[in-house]
Amino acid sequence: MKDTCVFDNEKNKIEPGTLYLVGTPIGNASDIGERAVKTLAGVSFVAAEDTRNSGRLISNLGIKQNYVSYHEHNKAEAGPKIVERLKNGESCALVTDAGMPGVSDPGQDLVTLCAENGVKVTCVPGPCAFVTALVLSGLDTRSFCFEGFLAGSNGEKRRKLESLVSLTQTLIFYEAPHRLKETLGLLLDVLGDRKAALCRELTKLNEEVVRGTLSGLALKFTQTEPRGEFVIVVEGKTSDDASEWSDLSVEEHIASYVKSEGLSTMEAVKRVAKDRGMKKSEVYKFTVK
C-alpha cells in the first residue's frame, strides 16, 4: 500500500482509512496545487468521475495510480465498495472531471456514506467554477445562493425559481450549452430583468465573461450559438424592486398592473406574487370578493 508519509510536513501525511476530496483544475492544468499533487501520488487509489479524463491529468503529473470509477450512474454500487476499502485501511482521493468534488456531483453522496460509517473525510481545496464566476461577475459577492443545475421538468424549474424570487443574495446556476437559451428565458420570465453575468470556459484559452441584463444576455444567444459550459450569475432582489409598490396593498398592487399594463387579473396575480415573494394562490385570494 501507498499509505506512507509522502509529505515533509507531518500535518499533511497521507492517513490510512481516509477519503480525500481533491480539487482539480477547471480548465488550466497549471492550477493544480502542490498538496493536491502529493495527495494524488500518495493515496492507495483514486476514485474518478471519468477515469480517462482524470487519468490523463494525473499521468501528465508523472504519477502512476490505481483507479476506480465513481459517478452518478454507479454510485449506489461503487460507493459501498470504496467505503469498505477505506474501513480496511486504504486511502482514496476522490476527483471529478473538474473542480471541487461534492459540488453538483455525486461526491456528496460518498461523503455522506463515509460519515454514516465513521470513515474520516478531509479536503484538499482547489479550483471551483461557481466561486470563480462569482468573483468575475461584477455582482455582489458578500452573500450568495448557489443552486447548481436547475433540475426536473419546466414546471419544477419554474417553481424552484419562484421560491428564489424574494432572495436578496446573488444567485448562481450551472448550465449546459444546449439548455442555455431556455434557461435564460425562464430566468427572465420568473425573476424579471435583472443584472446578470454569463461565464464560460473559465481559466481556458477562450474564457469569456459577458455582463449585462437577463434580457440582453437572452438576446445575445438568439444570435450566437452557445458553446462551452456556463455559469450564470444573477443579481438578487434589490430594494429598488419594491419602490413602486411598497406602499400599495395587495389589491392595489394587482389593480395597478391591470390598469397600467393592461394585464388580465390572473397575469397581474402572477406578477404580484413574483414581486412580493408570495404564492400565486395567496395573492389570488385578494381578488375574490
Image: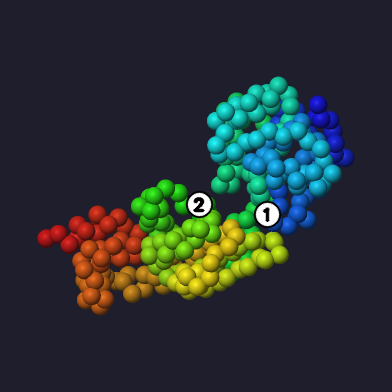
Q: Residue at x 77, y 40 (%)?
A: 40
**Callout 1: SS:** loop
Residue with the most extreme top position: 88
Out of 254 and 192, give the one closest to the viewer.
192
Q: Residue at x 46, y 52 (%)?
A: 150
Q: Residue at x 65, y 35 (%)?
A: 69
- Quadrant in which the N terminus is drawn: top right
Q: Position of residue 284 (x, y in %)?
A: 21, 59
Lower sequence index among marks 1 and 2: 1
Q: Mark 2, residues whose alpha carbon is within 10 Å: few (<14), some, or many (≥20)? A: some
Q: Position of residue 42 (x, y in %)?
A: 80, 36
Q: Look at mark 2 in the image and give the residue it sits on.
A: 149
Vertical position of residue 263 compared to residue 111: above or below = below
**Callout 2: SS:** strand
Q: Look at mark 1 in the image and give the residue it sits on.
A: 26
Which amino acid is tagged 1?
Ile
Which amino acid is tagged 2?
Phe
Residue with the most extreme left position: 289
User: Is residue 153 among the parts visible in the rendering?
Assistant: yes
Marks 1 and 2 in Cβ contact (< 8 Å): no
Position of 47 compared to 263: left or right? right
Out of 65 and 192, give the one closest to the viewer.
65
Q: Position of residue 17 (x, y in %)?
A: 71, 27
Q: Residue at x 54, y 56 (%)?
A: 176
Figure quadrant of residue 261: bottom left
- Quadrant in which the C terminus is drawn: bottom left
User: Is residue 115 among the parts visible in the rendering?
Assistant: no
Residue with the most extreme bottom position: 260
Numbered marks: total? 2
Figure quadrant of residue 246: bottom left
Q: Mark 1, residues whose alpha carbon is within 10 Å: few (<14), some, or many (≥20)? A: many
Q: Distance between the Cα atoms at labels 1 and 2?
A: 17 Å
